[in-house]
Image (tube, rainbow, N blue to C red):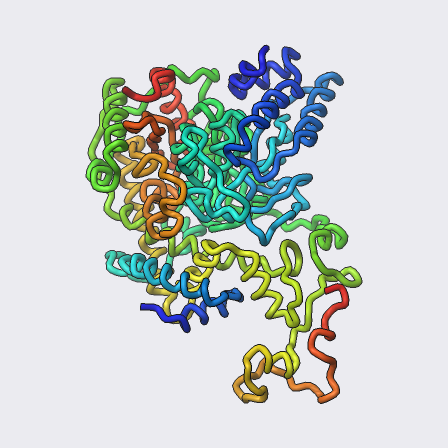
Amino acid sequence: MSKTSLRDLSLSEAALAVRNGEVTSVDLADAFLSHSEQVEPGIGAFLHLERDEVLQAAEEIDQRRARGEALGELAGVPIAIKDNIATTGMPTTCASRILEGHRPVRDATAVRKLREAGAVLFGKTNLDEFGMGSSTENSAYHVTRNPLRVDRVPGGSSGGSAAAVASGQAPAALGSDTGGSVRQPAAFCGLVGLKPQYGRVSRSGLVAFASSLDVIGPMGRSAEDVRLLLNVISGPDSLDSTSRAGGSSSRPGDSTSRPGGSPTGPENRADAPLPSVLGIPRRWIERGAGSDVVRVFEETCEWFRAHGVELREIELEAAEQAVATYYVIADAEASSNLSRYDGVRFGYRAQSAETLEELYTRTRGEGFGLEVKRRILLGTFVLSAGYYDAYYGQAQRVRSRIRSELETVLSGVEGILLPTTPTPPFPLGQKSDDPLEMYLSDLYTLPASLAGIPAVSFPAGQSEDGLPVGMQLYGRDDSEQDLLDWVSRFESSTRGNGGAS
Amino acid sequence: MITPDQVRQWARLARLDLPDPELERLQGDLDKILEFVRALQDVPVESGSVPDSVSESERGNHPLPSVERPDEVAPPLSREVALEEARSTSDGHFAVPAVVESEAQYERRTGSAGGDSNENTVLREDSDSREPGSSGDSNL
């Protein structure tokens, strides 16, 4: 097989080829590494990628096969990892100076599961510092460019993971999604990105940003690649008390190997059933999204309608408060979570501090970037005596309303179709000086995060000038498999023409 | 409109050193962001206690049940591994500078003479106390 065709294999095809001995894991890794050497200088997707390290991990897989050992479902497949997910043997910096060179003592549970399935860890990808941003411009190290149009942002905060896959440097990647950080960069880079149900994937080893929202999610070129990754990394974990079994509690008989949804059979889901009714919040979309996005939304509606899906207009009122709600809750949790960075046990330590207090304030002042400081300050304020109830308490109450509203709507429709972002990828630098403007662009991804429900972004079309536009499906609790089925159906009839047209 | 002193106070609560140019920039940003999130206060909600979003299963309002696990003793991180990433250690411990500042350090930090009765965190030391900076760990 030529190097190009090796890079074109789906995850399951690649793993099967390695298991059957049609290709070695080293050849597979080398195909991606060689391509990476050409394109990475113009993209900047990675914070850490060492050729020898990758080849050594691939070599180990090949040796295990030679010894006749059983190989997992990701045998020899390179997977890029967002750099806020702990990996032993590689740095984990969260794109922050305060963790420069940090080497975790444990793998994240999701990483351990990837290794057990035979995956080859393919470097650590860039992000907005600690996941705080929507463009990957808040990295302390360098910006990442959108491989589809290099003057545009790749989205964020999992922009490095999205750019690595979209530029063909890795076949798939892990990201993390607190308020849209998997879905929005997937939309901006023409990929499928899944935010699983909260708790579906263990947070153990995912560096904490906002613990009631954080979830690790897979990003890939197809719904089936994303599904395979989800099935490998999900499941309950004694190291995360919020992690849970794969939908099997609510649906007896489900196999735990297919977390989050109906029992399903063969891998080819192109004939999977579509929902009978989807909700569309049309008014909210027409008010909030740009013309390109509205057009692709209408085209996607048309595709579903043509395939027998009833589209029912719904109103989401509480969800329109999601941006303000999210930035109060996420920043409150961040201000607490990030108090651990104090220069004592790990990470950056300020020089020449004479007292402990000075060590704390200088380490944090020098180690954190501006956006992280902004959020810590806001979070500290909304939790402070005298303001707690009016800000944090009120945000929690509104969050409850958002969750109830989505629950009620989703009892009448099987899913909600809406855009992932209000615009196609914006130019580098356009919003980096205006944090509020950046926050407002998250309006369509935040409600699912606050409610904890699964949501998937998938490529649905293009803007007038050829930029990718992603659509999003929200699902009921534990419905990841259904969402991926629907996206698979959409892909199978639209692949090759760039969208729903 | 939030004031520079408010931002300074939040920074102090968060143990965050903010140089003046950053403080100025953040003050403007935070002012705009707080103005925006203040709209939340007009959203009609059921009054009452703040819901705990993670363990709110009784009200059927969140899908996460409380989970328990057996309380079993497991090996902790070894001391060696736990100290591996620390920049400064001493005798198998994390090393830090003086927890309590000397009077001279206090004066330099606040630019004023010590001894204010409200500053109960300042311990006065004898006049022959060690020079500031020499009281910390030698690894620093």
Farthest residue toward the right? B91
Q: Residue at x 21, y 36 (%)?
A: A282
Q: Percent position (x, y) of residue A366?
A: 56, 59
- Please determine whether, in this image, residue B135 is positioned above or below residue B79: below
Q: Percent position (x, y) of residue A89?
A: 69, 39
- Left or right side of B92 for B31: left
Q: Percent position (x, y) of residue A317?
A: 23, 46
Q: Residue at x 24, y 18 (%)?
A: A306
Count of all numbered marks drawn on residues in the image? 0
Q: Residue at x 31, y 37 (%)?
A: A423
- Left or right side of A84 for A333: left
- Left or right side of A185 for A103: right
Q: Quadrant of the N terminus of chain A?
A: top right
- Please determine whether, in this image, residue B96 is positioned above or below residue A230: below
Q: Nearer the viewer, residue A187 or A14?
A: A187
Q: Nearer the viewer, residue A477 or A380?
A: A380
Q: Quadrant of residue B1?
A: bottom left
Q: Percent position (x, y) of residue A501?
A: 27, 19
Q: Is residue A199 visible?
A: no
Q: Quadrant of residue B9?
A: bottom left
Q: Residue at x 45, y 68 (%)?
A: B10
Q: Is residue A92 visible?
A: yes
